[in-house]
Every structure is written in structure tokens, then in C-alpha cells.
Image: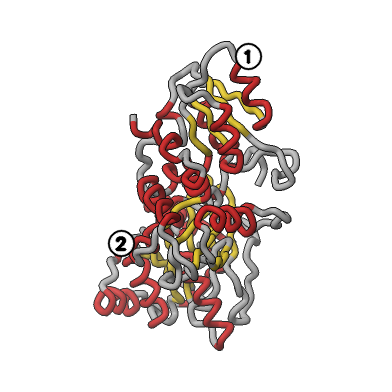
């Protein structure tokens, strides 16, 4: 992703689901006008979910998700189907592609039920319309047997040489119509500051920092400050004290990377509000109250408890990685208990959570809001306390109450 691109976590995610050879890949290529997906008569060409960020008019910036066939076979096929179902957790709009020459099958019905249960807006695309002499029997079956509203159905010929343009134009218009109406903009920090305010951002530069750029939460926070007509001052943690003394006026807020929380708290006068990027994103994409309450579980852990530490992205781990090294070390020191840790990253998030005593999640900058809230709901349904990195760190360092005070005004 370039610095000029809309982050994938802020794009509408369109999931394309269906059986093998229903025409999912042909449909994606027709929608995008590009050969993004491999098209083949061989069943099972798409073996893993493929996510592609792009502009799709009239919707704008989107992520297209191409998924494996829902009728894949064998042990490996079952894992591929599971991956396809996992993609529902990040899908904002679902497109179910059905082979129009066959009609709805049990695999189509099963995922449609899951889509409905998750309240995901959806469109059923009956593909291969050019090969169907009469559409009535298929439509009648869908309406009578599966209570499908005809308004949720569209016939297309994704791979046909003629008539495709109008089909695909209608498809994109129908998908765009399913996009949720834009409500008030969700601010990261904009509702906490006023125009012309100074906001100091503390950004440590260590081995884990990406070379030549800032990490996504830092970029997004700076943009939100600019959109609020305020001023951002970016410093490293060892320069904060000097900057606060020479700034000429008191900043309205100091925002820090969670790993520098202790030093930044010590260097920031108590009359200046302080929080972290991770806590801001707990509010922006999740549920801050739930994550704050989850952090208090750290004082109730017992020997032998297992903690899940989950990250929303995959990256090369450094020797002192925060998720797999630093957090376990800090938690053991804080609790004095013999604890077990399990780790997941990317799209992996356990379906069964009952073996965990608590969950500590990253800030979720690479996950869209739907998936982050899904993971929090999973924990709540299983009655497993959940928190995130920054909230947990602030709690263990005794500065959580100070870090959330600005939200309680």
C-alpha cells in the first residue's frame, strides 16, 4: 500500500462466495476490468482467499475478497472452506455467486444462512445467464424453497463475450446500493481537540519501526489531527521533555506509542492529558469500555492460566517482538504467575475460546471495524475478558486511569 492509498482497513470489503466453477473469478475480472483472478475450467483454482485493494466505481475504494469454492473436497478442501467462512468476519457486502444452470445447492444455502445470521447486506448473482433458456424455474426454487427475495437476485453472464457490459454495470450499481449509508465520521482524535490545538505525538524509532515511514495508526492519527485544523508535533520519546518545555504553549494532548508509556507519563505534567495510539484505536474500531474492563483481569490470573495474544496482521517478528516477547515478559512480571501463552496473527482467530483465561489483542489497525468488533463479540459471548496491547500496558504500569480520563470529560 502506498502512502497515498486508502488503508485496506478503511475500505468497504466485498466478499465473493460460491461453489467451485460457479464463476466467481470470472465475475471479479469482469467487475474490475482486470485479470485479477485466475479463470479455469479446473475445479478448485482458487485455493486460498485472495484480497485485492482497488477502486470500484461507483463505490470507491474497496477490497475484493475472492474465496475458495464452498464444495471443495477432502481434508485440505475442508480447511479451504473454513477459510472462506472466516472471510465473512471482515465482509461488509457479500456477493453469493450461483451457477444459474444448476440453481441453489446445499452449499449455497448454508453460507446464505450464515450471511443472514451475521446481518451482512448481500446480493445473489445467478451466473451463466447466457446458457439458461428460461430463468423462471431457478427463481421459483429460490423464492419458494429458500425464501429469497427476488430483489436480492441478479442474472449475469460474467464470461460471455456479448451482453457482459450491461450485466456488470448493473452488478456494480446493485453492490453500491448495498453499502451502508455514511453516518457521522468516526474520529480517531478529532472530537477531543479544537482547531489550532497542539497535539504532541511520541513515536519511538527502534528496530521494530518500519524503515522510512510511520506505522498506520500514527499516519491515520496525524491525518485526523490535520482534518481537525489542529497542529501535530511528532517527537521521539527522549525528546518529549525538552519539547514540552520549549513549545511555548501547553499541548491539548500527548499521544504515545504504548511501549514508551512509562517514560512519557513521567515526562508529561499531570495537567496535560495523555493517552496512546492503541487506546485511541480501541475506541475507534472496538469497544473501549470492554477493553478497559478486560485489562483488570490481569490481577486475577492464576498459575496455569492460558492467555491468547492475537495480532491482526502478519509481519516479520524482531528479536524483542512486543506480542510474543515483551508482553508475556511484562505480564509474568506483573502477575508473578506461571502462565501459558498462545499466539495468532492475520486472519487466524480461534473459533473456540474456552481454553483461554483472557485475550490480549493488538490495536487492530489492519483489521476493518467489522472484524475487530466480531472478535470482541466472540470473546464476550464466551465470557472471556479481552483487552488490547496499549490498554494492558497502561494498566500494568498504573497509568490506565490517566490514559482514559480524556474520554470521560
Q: Which residue is mark 1?
A: 246
Q: Check contact, mark 2 vs mark 1: CB within 8 A.
A: no
Q: Position of residue 11 (x, y in %)?
A: 51, 48
Rounded to the nearest angstrom, the CA distance separating label 2 from label 1 is: 63 Å
In terms of image quadrants, where is residue 144?
Answer: bottom left
What SS does tag 1 mark?
A: helix
In this view, the residue in front, 275 or 283, is 275
- Residue closest to the far top: 248
Q: Residue at x 36, y 74 (%)?
A: 135
Q: Position of residue 202 (x, y in %)?
A: 61, 32
- Residue closest to the far bottom: 74
Q: Which residue is mark 2?
A: 151
What SS does tag 2 mark?
A: helix
Q: Residue at x 40, y 29 (%)?
A: 191
- Give the numbered dot on residue 174: none
Q: Residue at x 60, y 64 (%)?
A: 50
Compared to 227, does 144 lie above or below? below
Compared to 185, does 319 lie above or below? below
Of labels 2 and 1, the one closer to you = 1
Q: Position of residue 325 (x, y in %)?
A: 64, 57
In terms of image quadrants, where is residue 333?
Answer: bottom right
Q: Is residue 137 left or right of residue 352?
A: left
Q: Residues within 10 Å of mark 1 (few under 14, many from 20)?
A: few
Marker count (numbered): 2
In this view, the residue in front, 109 or 251, is 251
For the C terminus, the image quarter is top left
In this view, the residue in front, 203 or 132, is 203
In this view, the residue in front, 218 or 88, is 218
Compared to 152, does 396 lie above or below? above
- Mark 1 or mark 2, which is nearer the start of the sequence? 2
Q: Position of residue 185 (x, y in %)?
A: 40, 36
Amino acid at each position: 500500500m502506498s502512502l497515498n492509498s486508502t488503508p485496506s482497513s478503511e475500505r468497504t470489503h466485498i466478499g465473493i462466495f460460491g461453489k467451485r466453477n460457479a464463476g466467481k473469478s470470472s465475475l471479479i475480472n469482469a467487475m474490475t476490468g482486470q485479470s485479477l483472478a485466475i479463470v479455469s475450467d479446473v475445479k478448485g483454482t482458487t485455493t486460498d482467499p485472495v484480497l485485492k485493494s482497488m477502486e470500484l466505481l461507483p463505490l470507491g475504494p474497496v477490497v475484493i475478497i475472492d474465496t475458495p469454492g464452498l464444495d471443495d473436497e477432502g481434508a485440505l478442501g475442508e480447511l479451504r472452506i473454513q477459510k472462506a467462512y472466516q472471510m465473512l468476519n471482515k465482509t461488509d457486502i457479500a456477493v453469493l455467486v450461483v451457477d444459474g444452470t444448476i440453481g441453489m445447492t446445499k452449499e449455497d444455502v448454508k453460507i446464505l444462512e450464515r450471511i443472514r445470521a451475521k446481518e451482512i447486506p448481500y446480493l445473489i448473482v445467478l451466473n451463466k445467464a447466457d446458457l439458461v433458456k428460461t430463468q423462471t424455474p431457478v427463481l421459483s426454487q429460490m423464492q419458494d424453497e429458500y425464501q429469497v427475495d427476488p430483489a436480492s437476485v441478479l442474472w449475469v453472464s460474467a464470461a460471455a463475450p456479448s451482453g457482459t457490459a450491461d450485466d456488470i454495470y448493473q452488478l456494480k450499481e446493485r453492490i453500491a446500493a448495498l453499502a451502508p449509508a455514511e453516518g457521522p465520521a468516526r474520529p480517531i482524535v478529532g472530537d477531543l481537540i479544537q482547531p489550532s490545538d497542539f497535539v504532541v505525538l511520541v513515536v519511538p524509532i527502534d528496530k521494530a519501526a518500519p524503515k522510512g515511514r510511520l506505522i498506520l495508526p500514527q499516519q491515520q492519527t496525524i491525518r485526523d489531527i490535520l482534518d481537525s485544523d489542529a497542529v501535530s508535533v511528532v517527537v521521539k520519546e527522549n525528546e518529549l521533555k525538552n519539547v514540552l518545555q520549549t513549545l511555548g504553549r501547553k499541548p491539548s494532548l500527548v499521544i504515545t506509542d504504548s511501549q514508551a508509556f512509562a517514560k512519557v507519563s513521567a515526562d508529561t505534567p499531570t495537567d496535560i492529558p495523555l493517552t496512546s495510539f492503541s487506546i485511541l484505536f480501541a475506541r475507534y474500531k472496538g469497544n473501549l469500555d470492554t477493553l478497559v474492563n478486560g485489562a483488570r483481569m490481569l490481577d486475577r490470573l492464576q498459575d496455569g492460566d492460558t492467555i491468547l495474544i492475537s495480532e491482526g496482521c502478519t509481519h516479520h517478528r524482531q528479536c524483542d517482538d512486543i506480542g510474543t516477547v515483551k508482553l508475556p515478559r511484562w505480564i509474568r512480571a506483573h502477575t508473578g504467575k506461571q502462565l501459558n501463552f498462545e499466539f495468532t496473527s492475520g486472519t487466524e482467530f480461534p473459533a473456540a475460546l474456552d481454553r483461554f483465561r483472557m485475550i490480549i489483542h493488538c490495536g487492530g489497525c489492519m483489521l476493518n471495524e467489522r472484524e475487530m468488533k466480531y472478535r470482541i463479540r466472540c470473546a464476550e459471548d464466551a465470557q472471556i475478558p479481552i483487552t488490547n496491547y496499549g490498554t494492558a500496558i497502561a494498566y500494568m504500569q498504573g497509568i490506565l486511569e490517566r490514559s482514559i480520563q480524556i474520554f470521560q470529560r
